[in-house]
Amino acid sequence: MYKLEDIRSIHLEVTQNCQASCPMCDRNMNGEGINPHINLDELSYKDCVKIFNPAFIKQLNTMYMCGNLGDPIIAKDTLEIFKYFREHNSNMWLSMNTNGGAKDVNWWRELALVYGRMGAVIFSVDGLEDTNHIYRQGVVWKNVERNMQAFIDAGGRARWDFLIFEHNQHQVEQAEALAKEWGVEKFMKKKTGRFVDATTNKKEKHQAKDRKGKDSAELKKPDTKYQNKALTKQESIVKKYGSMDAYFDAAPIVCKVKKENSLFITAEGLALPCCWTAGRMYKWWHKDPKVEQIWDFITDKTALDARNGLDKVFETGIFEDIQNSWNKTSCADGKLKVCAMKCGAEFDPFANQFL
């Protein structure tokens, strides 16, 4: 797939902790309890110094914090980790995705200074004061507003990603106008792939729960103009191949991270190609998470711990094993299905979010 010296981008999941309980996030069970298979791990500044030496950082073009299970602003050492990368590479691009609802204004002002013009924060804000909390459960609007403005006023570059549902679609234009007023550089109307099912089933709605297990909002697809194009593309795929599984068996893989020379580091410190492969490790609805196919490629989880040396992780051969699986005749034969789901040549709900 690639060698250590080829890596130019790091995708860092610094924590599995978050103050929010978004109902379609794998961190929690529809917004209720925490995923029973995770330990709320978090990488420290010292962990990152172990994983990323100065020479390696110098070869990078980008480092961004996002991940599957947590928000970078909840981690204790996020700011210090960004400082460490900036210290050893003044020209690389730094960024993170966040709900924006934590830390104080001084923290946000300092982050803007660390980034300078070579960085940006992507604020995931799905509505206005009366709607953002419907999906971003637990996120306080006044904190988001305060922190976005503090970051931008200090010279920070910001992007607003607005995830569109039925309950907030009427506010898209108003939110875009507010973004311009605040000085946000880019406003993205994000056509969620959350209603695109990997089977032939059509997912029309999703029942959210609060942290006490009670039904909260019923999340529904927006109007057609705001829907992910993969929803209609799926129909033609099924017509052509007979089923989504048949498509996954046949689909050529156009690997996004191979093209970008990107590497994903989990909050446990594990090195894997991407957030999607890592994301299959701990699905909360399985009694035993190791029923997921990705575990067929992980014989010893500790061997993937980047804190013991990224070079040692590459020596395990996991990246070659994943790439070689793409030549298998089917997923049942060993082709890694998540690769076909996320990087199959004819079906890409992720990319279609931004069209």
Image (cartoon, grey):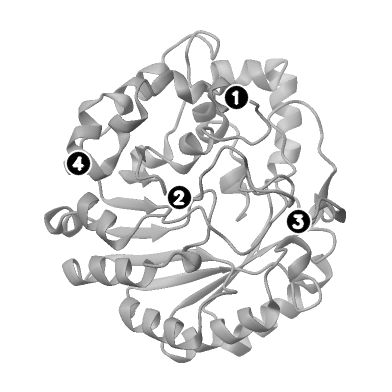
**Residue ID for mark 3:** 211
**Tag count in the figure?**
4
> Which residue is tagged 4?
309
Query: Which element type, helix, strand or loop, lies under badge 1?
Result: loop
Q: Secondary structure at mark 3?
A: loop
Quadrant containing the C terminus is bottom right
Q: Which residue is mark 1?
A: 288
Looking at the picture, which amino acid does disc 2 mark?
Asp
Residue lying at 84% horizontally and 63% vertically, measured from the top left: 167
In terms of sequence position, does the residue under pointer 2 or pointer 3 come before the other?
A: 2
Q: Is residue 327 above or below residue 4?
A: above
- Which mark lies nearer to you, 3 or 4? 3
Could you give the CA–CA distance between mark 3 and mark 1, rounded to whole angstroms?
23 Å
Q: What crowding class fits label 4: few (fewer than 14 Cα within 10 Å), some (14-19), or many (20 or more)?
A: some
**Amino acid on which the number 3 mark rests in the picture:** Arg
Of label 2 and label 1, which has the lower sequence position? 2
For residue 41, the mark is: 2
- The Cα atoms of the two marked residues, 2 and 4, are separated by 19 Å
Q: CA distance from mark 2 to mark 3?
A: 20 Å
Q: Quadrant of residue 202?
A: top right
Q: Around disc 3, counting alpha carbons within 10 Å, would you say few (fewer than 14), some (14 to 19), or many (20 or more)?
A: many
